[in-house]
Amino acid sequence: MRIRWIGHACFLLEGSKTVIIDPFLIGNPVTSLKPSDIKADLVLVTHGHGDHLGDAVEIARNNDCPVVAIHELSRILAAKNIEAVGMNIGGTALVSDVKITMVKAFHSADVEEDSGIISAGDPAGFVVELDGVKVYHCGDTDVFGDMRLIGELYSPDVMLLPIGGWYTMGIQEAVKAVELVKPRYAIPMHYNTFPIIETDPSGFKERVEKAIKDVSVVVLKPGEFFEIQ
Ligand code: NI
Ligand code: MN
């Protein structure tokens, strides 16, 4: 399976199915991809903020594929004439033959509609199992102690986690998050998209690999992928 970082919190998981997570393309300064460039079997959205919900509706329409989100956000999306699958924290669902577990994230969530800003349920993370590889996309979050449980319960091979600070955890917290989850690989995200979340991913890599055994940090540039068996 290939894990391609589009940039910010947006990843494509490319295997027997193609899954796109948090498809923020239009307005994302680190990618020139457009919603019409994306071929996907499934769209996952961690929360309603514009840099995560992004172009989910258009991609779902173009591909005639479902969007998975927390119950409240899925109801907002279902009103847009797309297939929206709602689930909730701790639940596991099989959608488009992909196994998805929704997990906690410590953050906030609303969604901007033409009518104004409305509440969109809690923010979430996902553990996605595709072709035998388990990927934990943390969403926007701080580190929290129960990440240890997520590690114990699902044993993710790869952890995709924010390191940019300001709106999410920064490097100090992210190192602790990797220590709690103990994935085989950690891929940093949600940094250097905008000046306010600028940080140096090599500092994160150095600190993780020095402090934690058997974890490799893979630093990607937007557009690059990491292949895992
Ligand atoms: Ni957010
Ligand atoms: Mn965000």
Image (cartoon, rainbow, N blue to C red):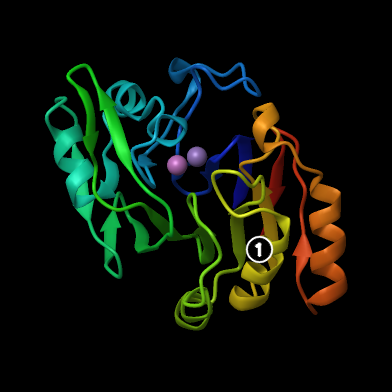
Q: Is residue 11 above or below residue 158?
A: above
Left or right, 97 with reference to 143: left
- Specify the amino acid type for callout 1: Glu
Picture quarter with ligand 1:
top left
- Residue 195 makes an appearance in the image: yes
User: Which quadrant does the C terminus fall into?
Assistant: bottom right
Q: Nearer the viewer, residue 40 or 158?
A: 158
Q: Is residue 92 left or right of residue 40?
A: left
Residue ID at (16%, 25%): 80
Q: Residue 64, how many percent across, how many down?
A: 26, 28
Question: What residue is rendered at 61% in x and 47% in y?
Answer: 3
Q: Position of residue 6 (x, y in %)?
A: 60, 33
**69 in relation to 81, above or below:** below
Quadrant for residue 63, please give it.
Answer: top left
- For residue 19, say whether it is visible: no
Q: Quadrant of residue 224?
A: top right
The relative height of residue 114 versus residue 53 in the rendered view (above or below) is above
Q: Is residue 16 above or below residue 62?
A: below
